[in-house]
Structure formats: C-alpha cells, structure tokens
Image (cartoon, rainbow, N blue to C red):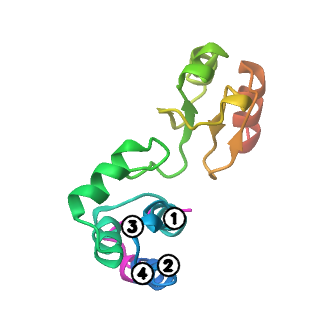
Amino acid sequence: MIPFDATADDAGDRLANFEKQLLTLPSRKSYLLPAFHMAQQYLDWLPRESILVIASHLRIPLSEVYATATAYSELRLEKPEYGAWYMCTGVACEAAGAQRIIAAIETVPGKFGRTDCQFLCSLAPICTDHRGRILGRLTENRVRAIFLEDRGD
C-alpha cells in the first residue's frame, strides 16, 4: 500500500473511506486501539488528520489520543517510505541476530530501515518487507535471498 499523503490527488477519498469505516466503531474510549489499527489499515500510518478524526469520533482529548499513539511502537506516526523494508530492533530480535542481518542486507542496494519492537518475539528476528508482509526466524542468507529475489535480481 502506498502511504497516505495529504497532498496526493486521492487524499480526500482515502481519508473519507477511513472516516466512513471509523463510524462503524462505537464512540467510546475503549475503541481507541481498534481505531488506530483501522487508520493504519486504510492509510498505512497515523497522519495528523487521522488522529484528529479519531479524537473527534471517540470524544477523547487530542492530547490523550496522541499520547496513546506514541506509547505503541507498532503504530506509525511518521510516513513510511514506500517500498522500504524494516528490521525489528527490539531486544529479542537483537539477541537473535538483527544487527548481523542489517549489516548483510545493507550491502544490497535498496531501501532498508530499522523499527522498534514489533512484539513478535517468538519469531525473532523479524523483518517487514516492502509489501507489509512479516518475515520471521530470519538469517542473513535468507533475507539477502528474499530481498534479491523480490527485486528481480
């Protein structure tokens, strides 16, 4: 999915689709996390516009909505780079070799970044590919092969 961009031609439609789906959730504080997940499903991250809409619909102060969003590392408050891969750098992934994988994959040209813990520790180390798929129990060779194969090299 291409991340939501407020300046894109389809921005209004994408935000409207999200708002329409948000209305299916009751206007209660207990639906804050489902609303965040819905925003990420429709917009691929939590742009300011989505946080404003969520705060309004759930009748929660904007400061509380933003504070909650910042407490969860799986919620993206920055626009992800389209086509990028992200390696989890949480404690379990680090212990399972995330840095070796990062070093191995950085030798291959392409977009590759790091992300905070994704809470999939039983699958460590994990990586999210450019399509949003989660790949677990990775090794340097497996990631390099998947990365090169997917790029068509």
Residue at 47% across / 80% down in the picture? Answer: 26
Characterize the local packing of mark 2: few (<14), some (14-19) or many (20 or more) Cα atoms within 10 angstroms: some
Residue contact between numbered discs 1 and 4, judged by CB atoms under 8 Å:
no
The residue beneath circle 2 is: 25
Between label 3 and label 2, give the one nearer the viewer.
3
User: Residue under circle 1?
Assistant: 34
Q: Are marks 2 and 1 in contact (CB under 8 Å)?
A: yes
Task: Please tell me which of labels 2 and 1 falls first in the chain.
Answer: 2
Is 144 situated left or right of 111 in this image? right
**Residue in the picture at 73% in, 43% down:** 150
N-terminal label among 1 and 4? 4
Per the model, the C-alpha gap separating discs 3 and 2 is 10 Å
- Disc 4 to disc 3: CB gap under 8 Å: no
Most foreground residue, 93 or 70: 70
In whole angstroms, how far apart are the C-alphas of marks 1 and 3? Answer: 10 Å
Residue receiving disc 4: 19
- Quick one: label 4 or label 3, which is nearer the N terminus? 4
Q: Which residues are magenta?
A: 1-12
Secondary structure of the residue carrying numbered label 1:
helix
